[in-house]
Structure formats: C-alpha cells, structure tokens
Image (spheres, grey):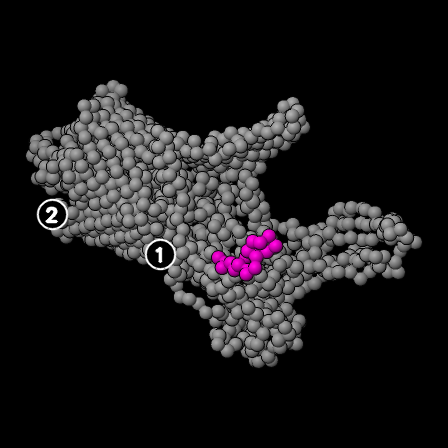
Amino acid sequence: MEKNKYSFLIFTCFFLLSCEKTIEFNGETKEPLLVLNSFIRADSIIMAEVSKSAFFLSSNTPALITDATVQAYSNGELIDELEHIGNGRYQLNYCPEVNEEISITAAKPGMNNINASTKIPERTNVISIDTTYLNVKETELIQYVENDQGYYDYTRVGTLYIYEILFKLKFKDPPGIRNYYRLTGKIKIANIHDGYYGGGDYYNDGNIYPDDPIFGSSSNSVWGLENETSNTYNIFSDDLIQGKEYQLKFTANAAKYDFFKEYAPDKPVHDTLFVNLQALNRDYYLYLRTLDAYWNSYGVEIFSEPVQIHSNINGGIGILGSYSDNLQVFVIK
Amino acid sequence: MKKVICVLSFLLLVAQYPIVAANYTISGYINDVKNSESLLGASVFDLLSKKGTVSNNFGFFSLTLPEGAVDLRVSYIGYSEQQIIFSLTKDTVINIQLFTSNELKEVVVTANQSELGVRGSQMGAIEIPVEQLKAVPTLLGEADILKALQLLPGVQGGTEGSAGMYVRGGGPDENLILLDGIPVYNINHMFGFFSVFNADAIKNVTLYKGSFPARFGGRLSSVIDIRMNDGDLKNYHGNVNLGLIASKFNIEGPIIKDKTSFNFSARRTYFDLLTQPLIKKLSEDANTTAGYYFYDLNAKLTHKFSDKDRLYVSAYLGDDAIYADVTQEDYEDYSQSYSNRILMDWDWGNAIAAARWNHVLNNKLFMNTTAAYTRYRFYLSMSNVVESTPPSETDGTMKIGYRSAIEDYVVKVDFDYIPNPDHDIKLGLNYTYHTFRPGVNTLQVNQNNENSINSTTGDNPIYAHETSAYIEDNFILGAYIKANIGLHYSFFHVEKKHYQSLQPRLSARFLATENLSFKAGYAYMSQHIHLLSNSSLSLPTDLWVPVTKHIVPMNSHQVSAGVFYNLKNWMDFSVEGYYKTMNNILEYKDGANFFGSAADWEDKVSMGQGWSYGVELLAQRSFGKTTGWLGYTWSKSERLFDRPDEELNFGKVFPAKFDRRHDISFVVQHKFNDRIDIAGTWVYSTGNSGTLALQNYTEATIPDTDFGYGGTIPHVSARNNYRMPAYHRFDIGINFHKKKRLGIRTWNISIYNVYNRLNPFFVYTSSDYDYLMSDYGNDQGFGSYSPGTEKKSLKQVSLFPIIPSISYTFKF
C-alpha cells in the first residue's frame, strides 16, 4: 500500500510539472530600428528625441542617438535641421501654428531613414468655464522657528483653506471631423517654507480629478482581483459628442493662505491652477491610449491581450504627434 | 413575417400535390431489438419505388408509398439490414427492431442513404458513431466526445489539452452545444482539459459546421447535437469503470417492461482524495483539507404511453469544485490561545432539466414539445474565522463571496411533417427566457458579535426574451436533385432594445451517380450572446452576456460546396470548401483583461469583422473490423477591426487567434477479435499564432505630466505575428476484453503522446544572467557574485509529456 501511495505521488508530480525548454526564434532576426519621439505643440519650438531600438532577444538595451541628422519640414518645405542639445534630444527654434503640417525626418548612417508627418489640430473651442467651491477644509498655518536650544518653537500665523472646486467647462466639438482631447492640470503651489512667502513650485497632473463619464475610467474588483480601466492621461474622443456642445466636469483641490495681520506677507500667497483642454491629433491620442493600456496590463500580461503601442514612424518606431493648448488660469483668492 | 407565411404556404401546397394518387403511409419507430433504444437517422428505403426516408431524432419515420407491393430495406450503421416485404393496402404502423451486427458481410450498408452521406442533401455535417468516438485514446484514458470531435476536419482545438473548439475560423463561443436539444453553456471540466459529457450516457453525436438546417440558430459557427441514451426497456444492465483520475457508473433498465425505462450515469474524479495525504504532509503547521474534483450526473426516464405518445424526462447535473479548510492554532502566551480558520469553496457547473413529449398526430405528422431549464453558475466563498480562548477583541469572522450565472427557461414545439417521400417538412417555435446574472460581490464582517459590515455590490440581473421560428423542407426534385431549403427567424429583446433577423438556409445535392454527388449550401446565422473569457483556458469566471445597445448581434454568411463519394460501400470520401464572413464579431482590446466582472465589458471589446476559408478532406470508414478516418484541413482565418476607435492592429488585417494553415488527423481502430481491439490517433497542426514584441525602445517624454517616462517599452509590429512550433502527437489505446460469468471485463491501456513530443502551450521571453564570481571573495571568505551579461531566450512551456494510463471496466 505504501509503495502504491508513493508511485501515485510520483505520477502526480510527473503530471503536474509542466515542461519548459528553450526554443529557437524561427522568425526573422531584426536589426535595431531608429526611434523618433516628438510632440509638436502649436506656437512652441520643435523638440524631438531620437534613439535606436533593441531586438528583443539581444542583450543590448535601447540607446540614445546623438549624431543623427534630424530635419523638420513645414507643409512639405524644409525648415531647418534640428540641433542636438544632449541626451538624444534635438531642438529647432521654429514655432509652428495650428493647421500647419510638420514632417520630421531622421537619418543615421547604417540604419534605415525614418520619417513622419503630423497636422497640428485647431485649438479647442471653449465656450465657458464655471467654478463652484464644493468643500473647504480649514487647518492652522504654523510657522516653526528654531530657538537657541536648537529646538523648534511653533507659532500659529494664520489659517490654511483647502478648497475642493468643481469645474464645468463647456466646449463645442467641431462637426464633421474626428476630434481628440486631453485635459491637463498644472498647479503652482505657494511656497511658505522657511518663512519665505511667495514663489512656488509647479506640478503637473496637479490635483485634477476627472468626474465625467466621457473619460471612461472605472475600477471594480472581483474577490480581491482589481479590474481597473484607468485613463492616466485624461484623454477622450468626440465619439459620444460628435459636433455638439459638451460640459466637462472635473474637480480640483487648491489652497488659500490667510495670514494674521502681523504675519501677513507683502503680497498675497495662494495656489494657482492652470487648466488646459488640449486638442490632440489622432496619432497622439492613440499613442497615449495604447501606452496607458500597456502600463495597465504590465505584470498581468498572461491574463491580458498584448498591447500594440501606437507608432506612426515610417521605416522605424515611435510617435510624431501634435497638439494645441487652450489654457485657463485660476488664482485661488 | 409575410415572407415566412408565403414560403410556408408554398411548401405546404407543393407538399400536398402528390397525395392525389392512391398512396398509403407506413410509419413507426425504429429501435434496437435488444434494448429498444431508438435509432436516429436510420434508413428506410423501398427498393421497388426507389423512395426512402430516415428516422428523426426520436427514431420515428414516415414513408408514403403508392398502393401495392413494398420491399422495405431498413438499415443503420452497425446493425443488420432488415427486409420487409408486404402489400400496402392501407396506412400501416410498423415498429421496426434491428439487430446489431459485427459481421461486415451482414451489413449491406446504406450509409449513403442518410442525410449526411452521398445521397443526403445535408453537407458540412459529420456523424461519428459514439462507440467509435469513445474508442479514441485520450488524456488519462478518460473518453471524451468533444476531444474526439476536435480530430475532425474543420474543427480545431485551442491550446494543448483544451476542450475549446474553433470551427471553420469561428470563436469558442460560436458553437451551439445541445444536450437532447437544450443548450449547454459550460462544456468544460478542469479548466477545459475534460469535457462535461460522460460518454457512457451518450447515444448519438452530430456535428454541423455549415449549411445549417433552419431548425438550428443562435450561434455562428457550429451545432453539436448530442443525444442521451433513453434506457433499456427490456433488461437491466450497466457498467462500472475505474480510471486513474475518475470512476464512472452507468445503469439502465426497465421500470415497467416495454413501457418505462431509466438510464443513470455518474462520474466523479478522486484526485482530491488521493492527494489528501500529500496535502497533509505539506501543511506541517496547519490542519489542512483541500482538493479539487468534478462530477457529472446524467439521468433519463422514458415512458411509452402508446405507439403515439412518449414522454422523456432528462436531467444533467455537473460541478467542478475547489475547496480548502485550513486551521492554524497558536499560543500567544501561556494564558491565551487562538485559532485562525480559513475556508474556501469554489463551485461551478451546469444544471439541465428537460421534459419532452412526443406525439404522433397522424402517420405523417409528428410533434415534439419540450419544456426545459438550463443554467450555468459560478460561486465563490472565502471566509476567515478567528477565535481565541479566552475571547479577545480580535475574534470575528469575515466572509467574501462572488457569484455569477446564466439561466434559461425554454419552451419549444417542433413538428415533422412527411406528406410523401419527396418532402420532409420540419417547422417549430422556440421561446427562451434568459436571465444573465453578472458578477455580484458580497462582504460580511462580524467582529465581537457585531455585524459590522454586510454589503452586496455588483450588477443587477439582465433579462432577455429570445423567440425563434423555423420552417424547412428537405425535398427531392427528380432523380438527381435533393435540397433542404429553410428559413429561421429570430427575435431578441433585451433592455428595451430588440433585434430580429430572417435567416435563409439552403443545402442542395446533385446526384451524379449512385455513389457520387455534388453539394452546395448557404447559411446566414445570427448570435445574440457573447462569452467573456480571460484567456485560452476555460476559466470558471467566464461569463455569458447578451447584446446591448452598442454591441449589436454577430452574424455570418457561409457558402460551401463539396464532392461526396462512396467507394463500393467500403469507405466514404468527401472534399468540402467553404467561405465564411463574420460581422460584428468581438475581440478584446489591447491590454484588456477580464476577471469575472461584467462591469464596463463593452469598453474592453472591439467590434469588427472576420472571414475564413478553407478546404476539408475526409476519408471515413464507419463499420467493419477496421474503422476510423483521415482528415485534412487547409484553412485561413483573418480579422479586420478598423472601425473608428475600435481599431486593432492599427486597423489592418491580422490572423485570427487560432488561424492554422494545416491540420491533419488520422484515427484508426481495429478489432482483432472479441478479446482485443486497438485504437491509435496521430494529429499534426501548424503551430498556433501568438503575439511577440520583436523590438524594445525608449518611451517618449509625454508633455504636461510628471508620470514616469524614459522607460523601455515593447514594439509589437502586428497582432499574432509569431508562429509557434508545429503541434503533433501520437496516442494509442488497447482494450483487452474477457467474458466473465456476470458480464464482460475490459482492461484499457492507453498512452497519450507516445513519442513524448513537447508541444507548445505558450512561449515567453526569459532573461538569465551569467553571474561572475569575484577573485578574492568577501569578508567572510565566501566568493561574491555580480551579475554579468544578460542573456535573453525564448522559452516554450509544454503541458503534457508522455502519459500512460490504465482503466478497468466491467460491463454487465
């Protein structure tokens, strides 16, 4: 009986142990390709990044290219060559306008030449933007000062108000064409460190919380396994609002500093919010969407469909996208 | 609707015409003489008038002939032909009973009389005798009808070992699998390595791949019509089978002789019982009980009220279950002890119940009425119980649960109207009330005897009404042409939205010689439900969902043509070609994954189109000492998802997931004598396609964001751009029979994957480092290592090497 039991266990292990072996890649071995990444912003200088890819079975890693010949064209006419400014980044002091078609070519001896084109989309037609203060949290503003014994004394110098603000941004989607949007938020936070008031640091992705079904992100879980659809870059298409006016809702947090009279600085100290409903061209939109999908599935690839990160570079890999801003500034007072 | 009524009226008018002559009808049932089991698709042919018919799915036949002499030949594969000569002077009821035969010479085979052979109008359909399907050697010796069907041309299995079926380029949810006419939603046990159908309970299996008769609808790619045994009306008998992973038991017999019979089959795996000592051994600190099993129960009651009325009541119940009970006891200090108990229970499976009433309205009109219930459900429960002695604040219980299901109530009525030998008209109505229960989560937390949390979250049930009606006429036009023309109408109502479609069907045959025919067919199909599935494996969390406002029904058009040849009643040959287009089919978007929640599922799929085409060759021998088939398929299946915001593969054409160019299967069985028979299978197929990123590159710096950038990301040039190594395998099984005093015992020895071919299950990229040892070692005197060159390679994971198995069967 004991013998039978062990025979069975050996058999069970034999069955359960799946076999693994190294196999030859039977496809064509690919040489590295030139990679061009660039996003053309209306009324801003042209920047591009050039690197080269690495074949997935090679031990090399993707490398920056510092000696490529990178040229920019406007509506088919050569503008100039981009200058390498370090770390594979190239720059041209030329500011294209909306509706301008920009092409970029890159060449490096021994590798395939690459090129791509993009047409800068029209700015978003923002009709109105309303704000509503939903909540306010009050906390004490404390100033810490080091005393003679090396300890810190603290003094209340005022009140910090943190507002939750609801934004209602109404815009008109142009009819007859497909349009793509991205909502960005930047916050300039007041700096009150070390008794110094004013100045401030800029943070992207600043405190913007999309609260609109058009962004399509959601999260739910089934017995602990998260099943999330995120929209990291706050992008959306006009699929559901084609040619219509639409009111976009989102919230943001920002602070106001109310100092007691004796501690009041020379100038007001407050956060500043920059809300930007950008118009993206289709390639830029698809790149962000697929890049987000890739990072969302990272680590659970075996359960996910493989992701093709969007590329529109002829002869190579990468992305040439374009966009235009429509920036709204809000100072919290 | 008007069109349907017009066609119906026309068919009935045409059908009535020949009755003007003095004709009489011979009708009745065809049964096995030993057990009265009805024989489906048996041929009844009058040699004098050259007219014939076949029995329907309940063994009923009706043949109207001119008054006078009749020379009936009744035949069925594997049975001795019976000749009945008499003078037909009035409508006559004959219940015909056939004897089984093992001798080739006794069988004057008229297989080509059947609807699937040379003389029949049906194409794109295959019927393999169940005994032949059961003899196909399989994984761990567990007879599996669906695995055997995967060996037929036009049918592809998914990944190795999976019971998934991809028929003529369609998806795994495009197969309508009917058990006694009732849909079965989950066909898999053990993540797809075994199917839910216990071969002992099955009488007949027919696979339709194209030219679908109008009586079928609701799926795009195939219909698998499985019929259960009715039960012996005369004698008690059965069998017991002991296998390596499962045991089976089957018994059937009369409750009232020649009136009421039963058939009962049960199967259960005992992997969990056998591995229990190992689990106990491995869980040293805890008291653990855990395991996995599945079981099936099939039961059928048949009652014959009279020659005109029969009642069938059948049921199927099958479940997979994973369970665990882990108790860990510990002492915090000498004054207090606590125990932590974790209980886990996963169950998923089908339940089907059906009642059918057969009524012969007159000798030309047969009616079958069915009321049925079918459901698939998945249930998960996990709980954690903490108890202390003496009681403490941490004591309490937490329980999380998840459940999902699909439930159908079905009512349908089908009529067979056979006005004369030139027409066989079928018509019917079907109503199904669907309840889709997407995932629902429950959470209960009870601490210190206070019910602190008791919540339920998830989607509400979705209710849908599906109605269909059909009419088809299988008619003969002159000496050469036979055709089945029909219409299928479907109406689907869900969440204030309804979809309807009228689906024409045609299958026609031109008989060039007695043994050679040419056939062509067309079918339009529509499908209103989808299976959300996470991977190539069949997981219990797979969820059926209905169409919505945005996700419209899938539909397909399929045309096919073929040549059928019967070589001297020795072997049947067929060559069929097909072209199929599919619209509104679904694929998961890039990066989409599915963990059993239906929430937002519409956002995770893209809608597009596909097409497939191919050629299928089949040489089949179904009787005699040596039987089997050789099948070959050349096929191509592609997808295009280019609708705005639905693009996959940059909006360009890409190969379907299981697009394979070549599939070959060779199945042979030979009976040496009453004591020994042998079966072997060899399969070859082009490797499955997969998606590999062939280049890695640097991510772009995204403007206006502080999220990470500059990392390395993969470049996938195209979906399914990589072809895995080819798949091939040889299996063999030998049966040793011996007659004992109480019955026949059989030892079966099978070897799966005889030459130990390591077939690909999936491939992945692996990174290894050549670690370099420093020269001097570290402070402790040990050599230190540092990572050296990274070596990347492609690894293949295989599931099943050579696997021998043995089983014992006693048939009484």
Check residue B184 for magenta coloring: no
Check residue B782 for magenta coloring: yes
Residue B99 seen in the current view = yes
Residue at mark 2: B568
Regarding mark 1 in the picture, which secondary structure is present there? loop
Q: Which residues are magenta?
A: B767-787
How far across and how far down the image is residue B425, in percent? 25, 40
User: Which chain contains the residue that carries disc 1?
Assistant: B
How far across and how far down the image is residue A26, in percent? 38, 62
Type of the residue with mark 1 = Pro
Q: CA distance from mark 1 to mark 2?
A: 40 Å
Quadrant where the C terminus of chain B is found in the figure: top left
- Which of disc 2 and disc 1 is earlier in sequence? 2
Q: What residue is drawn where x is 47% and y is 30%?
A: B289
**Mark 2 Cα-neighbour bin, 10 Å: few <14, some 14–19, many ≥20:** few
Residue at mark 1: B725
Using the image, determine if residue B490 lies above or below residue B169: above
Q: What residue is drawn where x is 73% and y is 52%?
A: A253
Type of the residue with mark 2 = Lys
Residue B556 seen in the current view = no
Quadrant where the N terminus of chain B is found in the figure: top left
